Amino acid sequence: MRSDGTRVKGLSPIVQALPYIMPRRFDAQNWASDYADEELIKAFIRKKRREGHHVTHMSVLVAAYYKAALENPKVNYFVMNRKVYRRNHFCFSFVILKTRADGTPDETPLKVFLAPEDTVFTISQKIQSHIDKNLEATHNNNADKFANAAFGVPGLARLVFWLAYHLDLHGLLPRKMIELSPFHTSLFITNLASINTSYIFHHCYEFGTTSVFVCMGKPVQDPLAPAGTRKKLLPLGVVMDERVATGIEYSRFFAAFERYLKRPELLEVRLDGQRAEA
C-alpha cells in the first residue's frame, strides 16, 4: 500500500497492458506544443496587481491546470512497477535559481501542495512563500539536505538512490521521503521565459511519479495576428505519460486547461467550484 496513492482496479485490458508494453516512463512519453494568449494573461495579471493581488504567469498556469485536473482526475494518476495508481493529493514541483554565499548560481527544486479550496491567489501566495524561504543563500530545503548528505560520503549516493528507487517500486518508500522528493509530483513545471529561453519538451523523470511536465518558453509573435498588430503567445511544451489516460481523456483535460487560461477570472474562486464557507 503506497502512502501517496491507491491502486486503480477495473481498468480495461488495453490500459492494464500498456505498462507492460511500455514499462519505462520514457517509453510512454508523448509530446505536444500549445500556445496561451500572452496578452490576455498579462492583462489579467496587471488588473489583479492594481487590485492588490500578486499574481504571476506560473500561478495562473498552475491554477488552470489544477482546476482542469479536478474535472479530469486521470491526469493525476501515475504508474509505478507496471501498476496504475490514483494519487491521493495534488502537488507541483518547479526549480528556482538562487545564488550561493560565494556568489555562484545554484538551482533548488521546490514542491507545493494544493487543495481543492485553493484559488489563483492562494496558489500565488504559496509559490512566493516557498521562493522567499529558499532564496536565502544559507538556506537548504529538505531535498537539498538529503542530497548533500547522500553525496557527502563517497559511494553513498549510489546506494541511497538505488535503495530509494527499489523501495519505491514496491511501495515501501517512506512517506517523508516521498513528500520531500520533487520527482514524486502531479506536475513538474518550468518557466524558461524567466531566463529568456525558448520552450523545450522536458522528459518526465523515470525516478519518482511525474506524469506530466509543462515548460513555458519566452513569448513569441502570433503569426495569425491581423496585419499591423503585435500580439504575443506564450508557448508551452508538454510531455505526458500516455499510460495514465487515454487520448480522449487527455483531449478533454487540455480543452478544459485552455478554457481556463482564456478565462482566468474563473480561477479567482475555489478551484473545485464549491462555495467558500461563510
Image (spheres, rainbow, N blue to C red):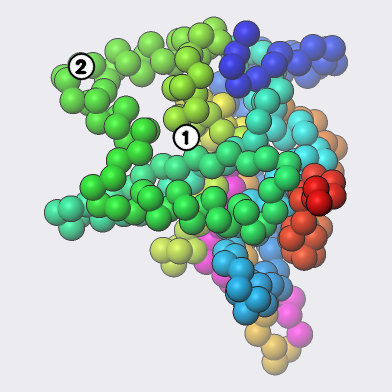
Distance of label 2 from label 1 (alpha carbons) = 23 Å
The image quarter containing residue 187 is top right
Give the x, y percent position of residue 22: 63, 19
The image quarter containing residue 233 is bottom right
Residue for badge 1: 182
Residue type of the residue flagged with mark 1: Pro
Give the x, y percent position of residue 175: 51, 19
216 lies left or right of 159:
right
Q: Residue at x 69, y 16 (%)?
A: 6
Q: Is residue 48 above or below residue 198?
A: below
Residue 33 visible in the shown view: no
Secondary structure at badge 1 equals loop
Magenta-colored stretch includes residue 163: no
Could you classify mark 2 by the number of other residues whose Cα lies within 10 Å: few (under 14), some (14-19), or many (20 or more)? few
Q: Residue at x 80, y 31 (%)?
A: 246
| Residue 102's disc number | none
Could you classify mark 1 by the number of other residues whose Cα lies within 10 Å: few (under 14), some (14-19), or many (20 or more)? many
Residue for badge 2: 155
Give the x, y percent position of residue 83: 67, 13
67 lies left or right of 133:
right
Magenta segment, which residues? 213-226
Q: Is residue 227 above or below residue 256?
A: below
Mark in front: 2 vs 1:
1
Q: Residue furthest bottom?
A: 228
Q: Residue at x 40, y 55 (%)?
A: 132
Q: Quadrant of the N terminus?
A: top right
